[in-house]
Image (cartoon, rainbow, N blue to C red):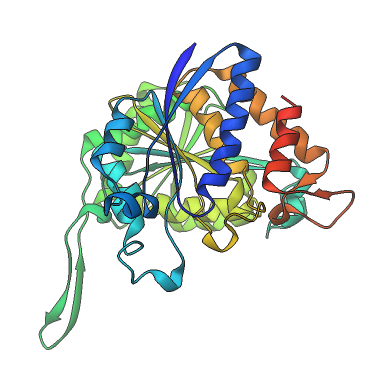
């Protein structure tokens, strides 16, 4: 099978972890007799250097011509955020890309392996069997796209934010989540604040309607404050979390830290057109760039998600996932996931990927 992949490596550690993901994809292509064509394009600060634009039309055109987009990370050092190259870099690149292609559904997947459970802030007894949680976050509604004002009213400072959802926006992500649930444990927890917010009341109504149309998938509702508590108290109860933009932003970050390192969490964003974008959930980490110490797992797992969800290469995606698991079981670690317990071998970005490829 031939597939064209848009490669947007970006800034910071993006290019070096992207290079490792491509090495793994090449190994998969050789093993399973596929052909992947990579078309590179600039984004973020790297694009600004060349185009004075964080998301040039040339990059958008490359994405339009691809079967999927594999994204790295964007952004620069905190102390340089005042410079034009880095000011609002994320909003002008990845957020603008999501808007340009109407990526309305975001999936983030957190896997905690028992071998590195000591890195998690949770008690070991809560993690004895590991964790595997998927968060579905709606991306184009909620307060992020509403009206925002900061002014004065009645002689004092005043702030106002508005948000909205339509039935079709909620139904789109709910139907997608129910389809994915059938490939996992047939279980969804829908998270909202329906006891207070009108948006959440509509969310619960529409998700409930979709649940009635999919009786083979168990679906329950949970208030977001309870969900935040339950993720710490009993995380094993969760398989798929389905939630809105604002709550998904917060909950997915909470889920990511349960694994002990943000370098472990891949994500995918889907559009109604069928195009999807795959990226690590972490940032560009410019302080560790080009030192061969970055964790490539999230970028490699993002490539695995691409194979599964965009190309329907389920066997190939599983091969990558199992190779990463086997590498961790064998004791190989990048520095951020070294527990300092038992027999571990701390290796660099490239060397860790060498071990993954060897196990493919």
Picture coordinates of residue 271, whole percent (x, y):
31, 31
Residue ranking furthest to the bottom: 155
Q: Quadrant of the C terminus?
A: top right
Q: Residue at x 57, y 38 (%)?
A: 19
From this view, report whether residue 317 is shown above or below residue 78: above
**Residue 97 visible:** yes
> Is 219 left, or right, of 256 in this rendering?
left
Q: Residue at x 39, y 28 (%)?
A: 176
> Is 246 left, or right, of 102 in this rendering?
right
Q: Residue at x 32, y 64 (%)?
A: 87
From this view, report whether residue 98 is shown above or below residue 251: above
Q: Residue at x 56, y 32 (%)?
A: 22
**Residue 102 visible:** no
From this view, report whether residue 330 is shown above or below residue 333: above
Residue ranking furthest to the right: 343
Q: Identify which residue, 69 or 142, lies in the foreground.
A: 69
Picture coordinates of residue 43, whole percent (x, y):
36, 46
Picture coordinates of residue 112, whole percent (x, y):
67, 44
> Is 25 left, or right, of 104 in this rendering?
right
Picture coordinates of residue 267, whole percent (x, y):
48, 40
């Amino acid at each position: 099978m031939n597939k064209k992949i848009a490669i947007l490596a970006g800034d910071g550690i993006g290019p070096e972890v992207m290079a490792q993901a491509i090495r793994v994809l090449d190994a998969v292509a050789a093993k399973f007799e596929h052909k992947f064509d990579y078309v590179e394009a600039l984004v973020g600060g790297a694009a600004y250097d060349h185009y004075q634009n964080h998301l040039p039309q040339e990059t958008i055109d490359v994405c339009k011509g691809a079967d999927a987009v594999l994204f790295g990370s964007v952004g620069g050092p905190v102390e340089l955020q005042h410079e034009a190259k880095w000011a609002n870099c994320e909003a002008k690149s990845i957020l603008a890309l999501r808007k340009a292609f109407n990526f309305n559904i975001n999936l983030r997947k957190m896997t905690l392996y028992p071998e590195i459970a000591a890195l998690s802030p949770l008690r070991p007894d809560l993690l004895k069997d590991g964790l595997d949680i998927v968060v579905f976050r709606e991306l184009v509604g909620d307060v992020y796209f509403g009206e925002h004002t900061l002014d004065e009213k009645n002689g004092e400072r005043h702030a106002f934010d508005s948000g909205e959802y339509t039935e079709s926006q909620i139904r789109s992500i709910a139907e997608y989540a129910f389809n994915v649930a059938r490939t996992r444990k047939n279980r969804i927890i829908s998270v909202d604040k329906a006891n207070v917010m009108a948006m959440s009341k509509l969310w619960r109504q529409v998700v409930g309607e979709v649940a009635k149309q999919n009786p083979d998938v168990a679906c329950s509702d949970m208030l977001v404050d309870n969900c935040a508590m339950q993720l710490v108290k009993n995380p094993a109860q969760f398989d798929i979390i389905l939630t809105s933009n604002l709550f998904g932003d917060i909950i997915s970050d909470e889920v990511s830290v349960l694994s002990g390192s943000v370098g472990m969490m891949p994500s995918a964003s889907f559009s109604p057109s069928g195009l999807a974008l795959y990226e690590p959930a972490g940032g560009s980490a410019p302080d560790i760039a080009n030192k061969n110490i970055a964790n490539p797992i999230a970028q490699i797992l993002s490539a695995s998600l691409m194979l599964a969800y965009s190309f329907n290469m389920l066997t190939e995606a599983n091969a990558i996932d199992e190779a990463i698991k086997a590498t961790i079981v064998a004791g190989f670690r990048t520095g951020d996931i070294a527990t300092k317990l038992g027999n571990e071998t701390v290796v660099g970005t490239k060397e860790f990927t060498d071990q993954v490829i060897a196990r493919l």
